[in-house]
């Protein structure tokens, strides 16, 4: 058993009381096996590009998906399968390197074929299989390679880290977290992995996230808890203002803990919601920190907004301003760009009430610059983490968003992606 | 007198029948004088940073301004002066290098002082002076330098080009155009200059634009014609998704042509509207082409949309996608990013009906890739102009937006702007 000292500070930060970090990602909870394999979908030899996990039993499964009007064939399949099974699933198969989007009838057939092959391998109904794809849009899946991958991938009860490796694309590192806590006297776990990097805004981005637990959950409660957690995590991160066709967050609950299924008012429901909130916010922040080309994590905290929607608008507008992102890249405390983003956000703003603080340096009060220490201000935007606090001075609503700086690395990553 | 052969193709393109290009910008029309001077607001020695123009008589004057909730003190002053004079003005004073935004009471006083000094210099009511500022936000104007600039700037009836030089900031070239046409048997002129570069989206951007004519215009008609022209020009360009605090478009009409003031139904009103549309669209396209770091002008034409709003949404979403902007920079015909932007735009989209054409190469039909020529597709995104046609196949609405690619140059321009 590990303790918090074995984990990085970014992971212990905001960990709810009474919870303990554990390893294993999607296999941290009992009753899940996972793995990944390289089958040649990606051009880089040997990089894992097909990942899978399976539960020993059908799980209550809920998801949130991209709001794009051109969703991938796999997103459409997931929605259809969850509707057909009444919110149940038992396995996930993911390929990276190809988005299987905008491939017409063939794309639809290929997504279904991935579910069928996975179902056959595991001996389960294909409707219990969720399918995800991420990568280039508009190229047919190389199904011979995908079939070989599904046939050869090995699942293991400690395969969570291998799974996490298999779902990433331009990410520079895996993003995994899991916690252990107690519900009704039983020790239970919740863990997950995500992939992100570019296209992370305004709604979930090209990001895939899979979360598992051994708790029993009421499906309606699970859906509402996931929606609420996603609203404060994956929907509050921005790398570049683009939204993807493939965004997917899935939560699996296999019920092995044999607790009374959690629902509103049931003991443990709030503890579970806090764990889910911690896990999704940690993973979302990790995506922002690992944005394409990013060198600094930006956290924008808005307070004093006249409404919840306004607080979110302002927080997201600041993270999404390319001009401010460039200033952060240059370690330049050019706060006027924060002010411009606040004003352009569409939120109710009284310029004479705005306060802006970078790190611990109060730069703007009542809408005008304070006599702040220039060197301290530069230092506040010069490290690996940049904290921007905006107080609108109008009401009681708050929001937090995460983003990153905009650098040459982002451009390099994205000028020749299809070559 | 010059003919079209003396002007670049980008200027003769879309020139309405019966109109002729002339030189002179804001002084092309009779009765205007203009100039600029270097007074040290900008750090680069000798760069013009204070510009002015004046009409011989009070003009009907209408404007459109930023919708930011944190507008600059100068934008607030322009609105107040136009309200006080019932839509009349006689001069404009512009400083570049400092936005005079978020400077509190001092910013307000400084803007008023600029109007007073200009009024005194010209011997006119300060309420007839429009004031603009562009540059860094949140630093007080160096009023000693501004005063020296206002005192020393020389106005001349051929000073339009000098004026155009004085208003630019990170622009790599001046942006000026003027046309001559006939209304009621009289030869009249309409000309203008703009500055742009970064922060060009979603509503007018850090851009300033001044247009003058010797026509007589009814104020309500002038306002509505300007609003309509801006909607199809400056509001349809995108460099980086940021909106500025200082955006201003002003139209001055001194009435020297002694025509019946143009209003809806009056002979010549449509000709004037066509000229205004041409001038604003040309200037807007020039801003996009000269976006910070831009190497390619992107024109996105949307057709087949279910509504006018949807057509605009889609056109703007494609120009505003950083991922697609990066692909264009790399000459990479990665059309999946166009598809993703279309899907994420919020417009009604049926993926199976979407067609995408790059240059003359039809890449996507009925939502899936055609068997297109890869080399031709690369060529279509490899030149100084990239044309993207998106047919949604749903309705009769169309829209055009302009943007540019996203390059290292943009990052370089914006990482250390305040230093």
Image: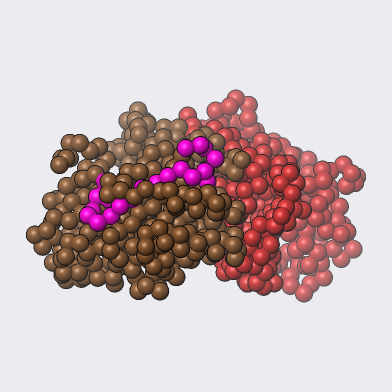
Chain colours: A red, B brown
Could you tell whether B245 is left or right of B155 in the image? right
Vertical placement of B230 versus A246: above or below? Answer: below
- Residue at left 66%, top 47%? A333
Residue at the outermost top position: A45
- Residue at left 46%, top 46%? B49
Percent coordinates x, y for residue A125 in the rendering: 60, 52
Percent coordinates x, y for residue B273 in the rendering: 23, 60
Vertical placement of B269 versus B295: above or below? Answer: below
How many numbered marks have been drawn onto this rendered protein structure?
0
Magenta span: predominant SS is: loop
Is residue B34 covered in magenta? yes
Please say whether residue B317 is visible from this viewpoint.
no
Camera-side residue of B73 and B334:
B73
Vertical placement of A313 versus A195: above or below? Answer: below
Could you tell me which quadrant the N terminus of chain B lies in? top left
Percent coordinates x, y for residue A316 in the rendering: 60, 57
Could you tell whether B13 is left or right of A334 in the image? left
Could you tell me which quadrant the C terminus of chain B lies in? top right
- Residue at left 54%, top 40%? B43
The part of the image, by quadrant, that contains residue A36 is top right
Percent coordinates x, y for residue B298 in the rendering: 37, 42
- Residue at left 57%, top 34%? A408
Highlighted range, magenta: B24-46
Please say whether residue A17 is visible from this viewpoint.
yes
Is residue B205 covered in magenta? no
């Amino acid at each position: 058993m590990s303790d918090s000292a074995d984990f990085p500070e970014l992971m212990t930060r905001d960990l709810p009381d009474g919870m303990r970090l554990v390893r294993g990602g999607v296999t941290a909870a009992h009753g899940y096996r996972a793995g990944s394999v390289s089958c040649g979908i990606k051009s880089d030899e040997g990089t894992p590009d097909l990942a899978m996990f399976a539960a020993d039993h059908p799980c209550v499964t809920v998801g949130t998906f991209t709001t794009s009007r051109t969703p991938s064939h796999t997103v459409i399949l997931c929605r259809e399968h969850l509707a057909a099974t009444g919110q149940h699933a038992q396995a996930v198969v993911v390929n990276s390197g190809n988005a299987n989007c905008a491939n017409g009838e063939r794309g639809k057939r290929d997504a279904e074929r991935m579910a069928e092959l996975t179902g056959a391998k595991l001996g389960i109904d294909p409707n219990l299989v969720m399918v995800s794809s991420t990568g280039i849009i508009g190229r047919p899946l190389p199904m011979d390679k995908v079939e070989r991958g599904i046939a050869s991938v090995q699942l293991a009860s400690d395969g969570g880290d291998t799974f996490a490796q298999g779902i990433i694309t331009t990410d520079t590192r895996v993003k995994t977290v899991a916690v252990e806590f107690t519900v009704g006297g039983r020790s239970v776990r919740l863990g997950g992995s995500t992939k992100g990097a570019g296209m992370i805004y305004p709604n979930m981005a090209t990001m895939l996230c899979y979360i598992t637990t051994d708790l029993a959950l009421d499906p309606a409660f699970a859906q509402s808890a996931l929606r609420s957690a996603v609203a404060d995590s994956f929907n509050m991160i921005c790398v570049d203002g683009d939204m993807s066709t493939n965004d997917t967050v899935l939560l699996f609950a296999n019920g092995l803990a044999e607790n009374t299924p959690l629902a509103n008012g049931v003991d443990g429901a709030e503890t579970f919601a806090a764990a889910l909130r911690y896990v999704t916010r940690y993973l979302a922040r990790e995506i922002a920190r690992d944005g394409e080309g990013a060198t600094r994590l930006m956290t924008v905290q808005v307070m004093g907004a006249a409404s919840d929607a306004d607080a979110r608008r302002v927080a997201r507008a600041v993270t999404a301003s390319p001009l401010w992102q460039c200033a952060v890249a240059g370690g330049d405390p050019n706060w006027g760009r924060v002010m411009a983003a606040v004003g352009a956000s569409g939120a109710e703003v009284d310029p004479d009430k705005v306060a802006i603080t970078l790190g611990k340096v109060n730069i703007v009060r009542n809408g005008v610059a304070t006599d702040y220490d220039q060197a301290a201000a530069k230092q506040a935007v010069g490290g690996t983490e940049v904290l921007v606090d905006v107080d609108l001075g109008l009401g009681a609503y708050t929001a937090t968003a995460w983003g990153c700086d905009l650098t040459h690395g982002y451009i390099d990553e994205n000028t020749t992606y299809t070559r």
